[in-house]
Image (spheres, rainbow, N blue to C red):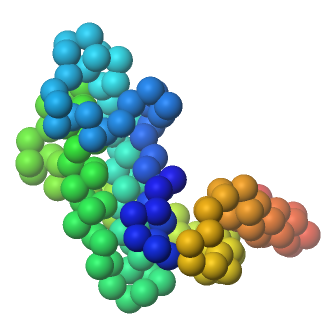
């Protein structure tokens, strides 16, 4: 978690070797051995597309525009450069679109949890250190409420 500008938070999520790899290392190049350690499988590339594009969709849903959209797309491009299977520009664009669609679907399906997380983030005074635990707790509480309501209604 980084705070590039006061009041703005940046959470970088990488599906493998989280504590061991910074995607910005790509600018320096990777050895063959290092690439083998961090290369993404097809499934991991899809997960990364969903993670990055859900951020873009979430910003659009909350603010009506995704002013930071280029950063999400750029970060996805960097991650997809680590794909075990080389991806053409058309394949990368298709994967980004798939991530947008799935991100939108996930945020709509879990709208209460998403709203609870946004409310928790907005309560944080500018300049304060971001703690993920209260944000994830807000999501979990809404998830449990939804699960309890579905159980009462007999839904699974």
Q: Residue furthest left?
A: 89
Tally the marks.
Answer: 0
**Residue at 63 percent of width and 79 percent of height:** 125
For the residue pair 94 and 75, the one nearer the viewer reads as 75
Please state the horizontal and vertical placement of residue 20, each as a whole percent of the image: 44, 27
| Residue 82 sits in quarter | top left
Q: Residue furthest top?
A: 33
Location of the C terminus (image quadrant) = bottom right
Can I make out residue 143 in this image?
A: no
Please state the horizontal and vertical placement of residue 18, each as a whole percent of the image: 48, 33
Above-or-below relation of 120 to 17: below
| Residue 112 sits in quarter | bottom right
Q: Residue furthest front?
A: 127
**Residue at 42 percent of width and 40 percent of height:** 14
Can I make out residue 24 in this image?
A: yes
Please state the horizontal and vertical placement of residue 22, each as a whole percent of the image: 36, 36
Above-or-below relation of 131 to 18: below
**Residue at 20 percent of width and 22 percent of height:** 30
For the residue pair 141 and 153, the one nearer the viewer reads as 141
Q: Residue furthest bottom?
A: 64
Query: Is residue 150 shown left or right of residue 20?
Result: right
Please state the horizontal and vertical placement of residue 104, each as a whole percent of the image: 43, 70
**Residue at 23 percent of width and 44 percent of height:** 78
For the residue pair 89 and 75, the one nearer the viewer reads as 75
Query: Is residue 93 shown left or right of residue 37?
Result: left
Query: Is residue 1 shown left or right of residue 68?
Result: right
């Amino acid at each position: 978690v980084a705070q590039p500008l006061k009041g703005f938070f940046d959470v970088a999520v990488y599906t493998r070797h989280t504590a061991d790899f910074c995607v910005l290392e790509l600018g320096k190049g990777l050895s063959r051995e290092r690439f083998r350690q961090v290369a993404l499988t097809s499934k991991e590339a899809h997960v990364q597309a969903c993670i990055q594009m859900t951020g873009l969709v979430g910003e659009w849903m909350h603010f009506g525009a995704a002013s930071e959209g280029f950063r999400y797309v750029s970060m996805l491009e960097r991650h997809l450069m680590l794909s075990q299977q080389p991806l053409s520009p058309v394949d990368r664009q298709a994967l980004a679109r798939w991530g947008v669609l799935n991100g939108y679907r996930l945020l709509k399906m879990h709208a209460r949890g998403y709203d609870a997380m946004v409310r928790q983030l907005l309560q944080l005074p500018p300049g304060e250190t971001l703690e993920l635990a209260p944000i994830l707790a807000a999501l979990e509480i809404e998830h449990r409420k939804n699960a309890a309501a579905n159980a009462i209604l007999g839904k699974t």
